Image: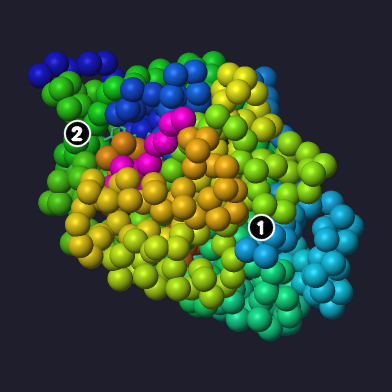
Amino acid sequence: MSVASKYDAIVIGAGHNGLTAAAYLGGAGLSTLVLERREIIGGCCVTEEIAPGCRASTTSYIASMLRPEVIRDLELASHGLRMVPCDPALQVPFPDGDVVPWWTDRARLLSELRKISVKDSETFVRVDDQLKKLARYLQPFFLEPPPELAADGLQGWWNLLRVGKRFRGITNSEIAQLVSFLTGSLGEFLDHNYESEKIKTLFLANNVYGKHGGPYDSGSALGLLFHLLSGGEHELQGFYGHVIGGMGSITQALAAAARRRGVEIRTSTAVARIDVRDGRVRGVVLEDGTEIAANTILSNADPKRTFLCLVEPKSLPEDFHRAVESIRMNGPCAKVNFVLAEEPRLNGMPRNASAAQRSLFTLVPSLEFAERCYDIAKFGDIPQQLWVDCVVASNVDDTLAPKGRHIMTCFVQYVPYFLRSGTWDENRELLGDRVVKKIAEYAPNVPHAIVARQVLTPLDLERTYGLTEGNIFHGDLALEQLFFMRPVPGWSQYRSPIAGLYLCGAGAHPGGGVTGAPGHNAAFQVLRDLRRRHRGATA
Ligand SMILES: Cc1cc2nc3c(=O)[nH]c(=O)nc-3n(C[C@H](O)[C@H](O)[C@H](O)COP(=O)(O)OP(=O)(O)OC[C@H]3O[C@@H](n4cnc5c(N)ncnc54)[C@H](O)[C@@H]3O)c2cc1C
């Protein structure tokens, strides 16, 4: 066993949040080391070769909520980050051959909606304004720790004041709307406001993304607000962006920003254990037995992996341990990536459609379909009929594949981690085949154009990317696991019961997605705590 040098801070994991945290800590002058178990950095925000010369965003594939503050503070553009807005932001083809795009320009979108229902197009303006206004109340919470439930005295008052300030000016009816968005179902909200099934489906297409629950489950309306939090360089509400070079360009830019701030990053270096003595972290022990000392450790691994695998149970209070065990994971998504010899030719796609319009389509025909799909998955079966979100990234990014090759990534909504019968190793290709079958219903040329296929089941997401039970958000984004309940009640401010150990990944507030927010917030919490300790020591 060899003991290496000592750092001010160690970050376990080089996902985008770990790198974000490290860059801020390095910028504040802390000697910081990032340790990543995989041979590449990026976690679930990566570009990988899936066939010779062909690269894909193997896991996350659209940047929508990357915090503008992180982009600016860490000067990611100067490190090569370039995003082009998705326009349309999303698009749904229907079995009858209609293709309905959601244009980013409101007038253009309205003219599209009017073709389907004049009444719904009018409702859209009212509801969209209302949603955008409500989302603005929530926006500031993204980049700050939630109020701590257990805080009392001065801290308790400060928390109350902080929350109160954010909601200054909110009206009674807005409070009622906010509560119904937080607790209500997307399906009921849409049924109540819209008459056209197609327009309802358009809303569905990206609003229960990656989470548990069908559109009629309570809490599913929350996605409507989440996706209106502004993102991208220009702080646009409802921004969706293709990242040139794939999502890995985000983490490459973050790594470059971190290195410029003095951060050291090591890959193929898995942490086996966090060394805890007398209730405080002392460092980490690597899988090869090497010990590295640090008084501050930030874990970018998910809460279950961090507290149930890297820390000995005796170091944690029993109730905390139990709360972490109860965090809901269990899938519920998969990803299938393709290299194609020709572009998908979607039934009903206008002849003059731009490359950007041809670059994305979501295959989910109705709310009822989605609800049934979740019901099947929740009992441990792989639905015959899948909900598939397709992005043909090579249409807007010629850096991904040579001429004549096309990259299509497909996100599959609602598959279980725990299968009722069989294993994912036995069912991997079956899942891939069902995805191809679904796509062929809308783009019949695809099956014969497949040059390479990569199927990532929830088990593969766990094995390869380190996501416990394959959960893409390090814990479901349900109300009972959000805000001051994330990762577990009483510990929402990035700290843990072990002094010096912090959580900096998607399992912490505000949750999953490529945002950089948990990493940013955790770093600032560490810096505040260090300043406090320093003041205490010099007083
Ligand atoms: C299939 C899929 C599709 C998605 N699509 C989108 C999308 O389009 N848009 C979007 O915004 N979000 C999307 N997401 C969600 C988003 O990618 C994640 O929520 C986010 O990237 C999590 O980032 P993170 O940095 O917190 O954690 P991760 O990216 O999970 O990084 C954690 C890192 O820690 C490392 N690690 C774990 N344990 C150890 C250890 N013991 N030692 C060393 N290193 C360790 C892991 O290898 C990993 O690199 C998707 C995710 C998946 C999986």
Observer able to see residue 95: yes
Residue drawn 57% across and 72% down? Answer: 367
- Residue 291: image x %, image y %? 19, 23
Would residue 457 be counted in the magenta stretch? yes
Q: Which residues are magenta?
A: 451-461
Residue 356: which quarter of the image? top right
From what the image shows, is residue 350 above or below residue 259?
A: below
- Name the residue tied to disc 2: 272
Residue drawn 37% across and 59% down? Answer: 415
Residue 78: which quarter of the image? top right
From what the image shows, is residue 531 above or below residue 231?
A: above
Quadrant (top left, top right, bottom left, bottom right) of the C terminus: top left
- Residue 408: image x %, image y %? 55, 38
> 323 or 367, which lies in front?
367
Tell whether circle 2 marks a residue whose Cβ is less than 8 angstroms from ligand 1: yes
- Residue 293: image x %, image y %? 25, 25
> 75 or 356, which lies in front?
356
- Name the residue tied to disc 1: 93
Tell whether circle 1 marks a residue whose Cβ is less than 8 angstroms from ligand 1: no
Residue found at the far left of this picture:
1
| Residue 370 falls left or right of residue 414 | right
| Residue 354 falls left or right of residue 310 | right
Observer able to see residue 539: no
